Image (cartoon, coloured by chain):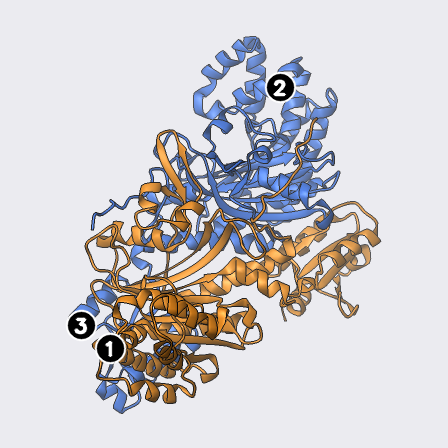
Chain colours: A blue, B orange
Amino acid sequence: MEKVKPRTLTGFMELLPAEQIEFEKILSVLRSSYEKYGFYPIDTPVLESAEVLFAKAGGETEKQVYRFKKGDTDLAMRFDLTVPLAKYVALNYNELNFPFKRYQIGKVYRGERAQKGRYREFYQADIDIIGDEELSILHDAEIPAIIADILNNLGIHNFKIRMNNRKLLGGFFEINQLADKVEDILRVIDKLEKIGTQKVVAELGELGVDEATAQIILDFVGIEGTTAEKLTAAEQFAGKSELFDKGLEELKTLVESVAAMGMSEENYMLDFSIARGLDYYTGTVYETTITDHPEFGSVCSGGRYDNLAEFYTDRKLPGVGISIGVTRLFTVLKETGFFNFDNTSPIQALIVPMTDNINYCIKAMSALRSSGVKVQTYYEDKKFKKKMNYANKINVPYVIIIGDDEIAKDMVALKNFETGEQKVCTVEEAAKIILA
Amino acid sequence: MEKVKPRTLTGFMELLPAEQIEFEKILSVLRSSYEKYGFYPIDTPVLESAEVLFAKAGGETEKQVYRFKKGDTDLAMRFDLTVPLAKYVALNYNELNFPFKRYQIGKVYRGERAQKGRYREFYQADIDIIGDEELSILHDAEIPAIIADILNNLGIHNFKIRMNNRKLLGGFFEINQLADKVEDILRVIDKLEKIGTQKVVAELGELGVDEATAQIILDFVGIEGTTAEKLTAAEQFAGKSELFDKGLEELKTLVESVAAMGMSEENYMLDFSIARGLDYYTGTVYETTITDHPEFGSVCSGGRYDNLAEFYTDRKLPGVGISIGVTRLFTVLKETGFFNFDNTSPIQALIVPMTDNINYCIKAMSALRSSGVKVQTYYEDKKFKKKMNYANKINVPYVIIIGDDEIAKDMVALKNFETGEQKVCTVEEAAKIILA
């Protein structure tokens, strides 16, 4: 028979089994953190009507999307989880209770030119809190708490959640007579860390911002000190712009509530240079960097917006949310040697039968499973060495050898595969040791 | 702004939040059962090269597939999880340890004409055990044990796993001089329950099977009695066909091992009429019916095959596996009122602040979360009645009311929302009661 060469498309992550176990652990941490904070799971289709999906999008995004026709239907694969959320909330408005808190973890698709670290299919894990007409600023403080919960549960403790407020920045530009250029300036400021002050001044110049004003902006976004010191420094600009004052007030409430959440000051800071390029955001914005790996960039970003679903409904639906690029996070963590794939076994114990009485082995296995032990039996008729080789390759912590001697005593031989220690005991004892 | 009407494509399931919680519970049961039995998770892309995906497919399947070009690349969305598994095993052969046990839960796509109960996007949950060149028949006994574990954990106790062996059937047709028509006859027998004996005789007639022989076949596939009685009845045909004898031997081993697994006879039976239409299967075959709802048909089917990946590799990779159509299972269970969506809350407790001291509420919430309680605070500035109405709508079991009186005593008021009982206690006590 002629064979087709098996291959996986470029830009599509497909992990080996031991790697997948670690990836699933991340998904599991995300699910349990999101649920602890009261978010409903939702699951929207990967395919949507192109008309619905492109209600808002345009330009660069649209070019990247996998869009095609099936019969007369114009279809597209989702490129994020935000547009499907907007559709979902607009569609099910009457069935939902607001504030509506949802999480969604799923694959999204972008047919970009493939490059290192860029995927065409990747997991996003989004949470959003949506209000009906209004949404208390206090919700904004939940977001850093959730980020911290997730990262701590993943075993990442050195991280910094950087927070800012778009109203504060916009207001500051207003004060400096730049009200008509706010969006453009924000996009330049967003690049500060990447391109440096010199280029930012140059790009601001192209926008018609003179050098002196550019310096005022750079001084403001570069304000240093403790959280309290930064707020005091910002205070000196108060009273000149309603927008600025509102932003400052929101930031103060945010900081106070985050402290009440019990978060360590080590893990969050105000950073007036955080802008988030997207027009979408209108209040609090977040970025999260892993301290030991600033080169990862932000692993978790988001913010507050005024209007989730304006392309589908007249209702004003403000919200606050974040997105974690799980596939990218996994990839960068893997590159730093964060995971130990050698400690990854699908089971806790492997039963190795050295007897013809296979039913005894099956019964022992069933009893272990009932006790909650992840276990399987090596059923193949191979030499002992080959069986042990399999146990070694899948990195199983315990091997249970069952021969006629053990059966005669109604026992099993439990071998700790790391220490080599072996002990003849009952199945119940074995379960206890394995689960200890 | 002109609005786009929000809608979800026909044939694409999108659940309301409370329904989604129940759906996620099913996924969670599947994952934990599969893992208990030693299966590795794997995750393959939704999109594959059309050449790779269609290495085997053809005819009806190919017509249903979502296939399209992006630039010069001919792409297709996966229509099952078996072809991606074959690709995965052929591609990663050198990195895998055999027997290789994997589970995959994911969405698959079939652009069929939409009809009741048929989805264009739906979840499959597959497990397969793959051998290298050979695979012990003992693995076949794990399959019914896993099915039973899953259904019991879902709260479905009245079910029957019906098992047969394609070699036994094929051998029986050989004995009756029908060796050249085995596949065709199997496809007719597969329809027995649906179309009845009369139509089966007619269809067999079209295949050139005379009425007397058709009756012999019907008598055989209709053999009744206990498992032991059925095996004894089959025994009388032994010695006439190697294939039949091999099938009978495999069935005996299967039945013996299934009994050793401790499975209740209530939950499995031999049924010589189970054929599974697909050419693919070569040994054990399984179907699972829910006793109270035979109209669901089989909710979990599968079997043994000789060659997983013959379109990609010369290596012989025999396996045994099953597939659960999760979306369909959810839909039929929902229709029978199996789920109580009114008992579905995203949280265990809602904090209702009746004070301006919101930080006290946040601190109480953080303490509860640290204790493992799923909790959120109702932050919106609304009347008490409105807050309670929200609690009622999301069906939360406990409400924690915090007013200045409680704060003065460093306490909270815990209200059981079902019984109406209310108690002033510390946050620690509240956590204990909620988690009890």
Q: Which mark is residue B418?
A: none
Front: mark 3 or 2: 3
Which residue lies under the disc numbered 1? B246
Crowd rating for badge 3 (residues with CA inside 10 Å; few <14, some 14–19, many 20+): few
Which residue is nearer to you in this view: B3 or A352? B3
- Number of the label disc, if any, that sits on residue A382: 3
Evaluate whether label 3 is on the same chain as label 2: yes
Q: Is residue B436 above or below residue A180?
A: below
- What is the secondary structure assignment of the residue under circle 3? loop
Viewer can see residue B38: no
Identify which residue, A29 or B318, lies in the foreground: B318
**Residue B215's x, y, as percent?**
39, 79
Tell which tag, 2 or 1, sits nearer the viewer.
1
Closer to the camera: disc 3 or disc 1? Answer: 1
The residue tagged 2 is: A182
Q: Badge 2: few (under 14), some or many (20 or more) residues near its Cα, within 10 Å?
A: some
Residue nearest the viewer, comparing A249 with B410:
A249
Circle 1 crowding by C-alpha within 10 Å: few under 14, some 14–19, many from 20? some
Q: Earlier in the sequence, mark 3 or mark 2?
A: 2
Q: For this view, does A276 lie left or right of residue B343?
A: left
